[in-house]
Amino acid sequence: MKQTDRFKEKNILVLGLAKSGLAAAKLLHSLGADVLVNDQKPYEENEAAQELNSLGIKCICGSHPLHLIDEKTDFVVKNPGIPYSNPLLQKALELTVPILTEVELAYLISEAPIIGITGSNGKTTTTTLVHEMLNADGQKALIAGNIGTVACEVAQTADSDSVIVMELSSFQLLGTNEFKPKIAMVLNLFDAHLDYHGTREEYAKAKGRIYQNQSEGDYSVINLDDKEASRLAQNSKADKVFFSVRKKLDKGACLHEGKILFNGEIIMQADEIVLPGKHNLENILAAVAAVKLHGCSNEAIRKVLTEFKGVRHRLQFIDTIDGRKFYNDSKATNILATSKALQAFTQPVILLAGGLDRGNEFDELKPFFRNVKALIAFGQTAPKLERTAKEAGIALIQLTDNVETAAAAAFEVSEKGDVILLSPACASWDQYKTFEQRGDMFEAAVHKLK
């Protein structure tokens, strides 16, 4: 990793632990910073804080005392999920103390170039595809970021012969100042995390930060089919490369006459791709653009796309039971993701949906209910989904407790040939810690049915 004196002998507050806070605190300590950690979880129950304490890093746990930030504080490194309305962060802003997330630290120490991938939907699938394609080509690709591997940990092991493929959330990007990926993309934009950002405009601005520091010699990969996402790159100084499922492109990746093309060259036939869903063609084209810009061979791309069936919790096929196909799309935490999942099927669908109520309605789902024969709703938003389904003319609607009972209820009302799809259109936090836990519970319930 690169050595930097940026943080040497600086007073840094790490706010919030989890995996990213733990890694950031250790890294900053190794770089010579005077690190103070603050976490809500009580010290007696906080294994991460106890580990840091054993390394000589002071930890204040159980509350967020305002005196932890003062004029002597040089930086705050925060857990991405902590909102800026937090009193400590408000005080930092008043004192003009820089607030960073650990992906900024990753960039500052990384010897490897970074491929940065963000968007409202498809981030994990695209990130995984890019990682798999580059490795299939014999390149040393590392995967990091919002996908579950802490970026500043990965950056410490990366060398100049590596490339870091980094999934980035709006929360992470909002805490960057100098972050500069070699290849950057915003896949799409849709209303998401408005409870955190306040407005769609602020959410879009956070996503757009992925392009802000790019310069000549870098690449901005742009979705030509999403006008709002495209606008975020209009001031980028990088070379602009497009992808589109609708238009034939001379420069960039596109779908034309049943073929995947890059810069006019045929990569493969689209019907050879095994990953289900029309929406995944956007993710595939974005991935193809990124890896071709990084020198990947067509053979490696074809190998991955003829074998890759998707990642867990993203339109993941689980099993067939008595002629019913079960799919886990727990990562569908907003309306756009669920609408795209519904478009992936022509068979009758039993839709399992619901979760955290962020204040929005679900009317935008109505046009995609054409093949939905039944709705099984759970969680805080169940009544709202019930109303939307009734207005859309769905006759069979049940409200239930959780995804486990929803799986059983869906099986009861289904018939051979039906698809039983968990695609919640909501975050999981009203009932589950993560969308992964929600998906795991659904999978367990399906296996129990079998």
Image (cartoon, rainbow, N blue to C red):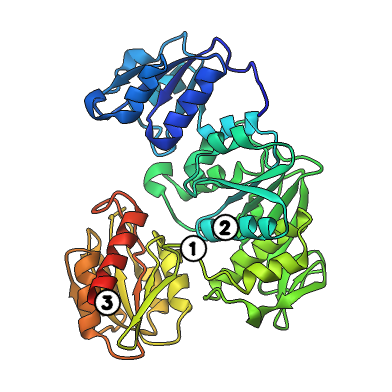
Between the C-alphas of marks 1 and 2, the distance is 8 Å
Tell which of 35 and 237 is nearer to you.
Answer: 35
Q: Earlier in the sequence, mark 1 or mark 2?
A: 2
Kind of residue sitting beneath label 2: Thr
Give the quadrant of residue 371: bottom left
SS state under label 1:
loop
Disc 1 vs disc 2: Cβ atoms closer than 8 Å?
yes
Crowding around mark 3 (Cα neighbors within 10 Å: few <14, some 14 to 19, many 20+) is many
On the rendered structure, is 382 left or right of 311?
left
Residue occupying the point 47% across, 41% down:
171
Residue 35 percent location from the top left of the image = 45, 16
Image mark for residue 311: 1
Residue occupying image coordinates x 57% and y 29%: 105
Residue 4, image x and y in percent?
Answer: 65, 20
Relative image position of residue 139 (x, y in whole percent): 72, 52
Please tell me which of labels 3 and 1 falls first in the chain: 1
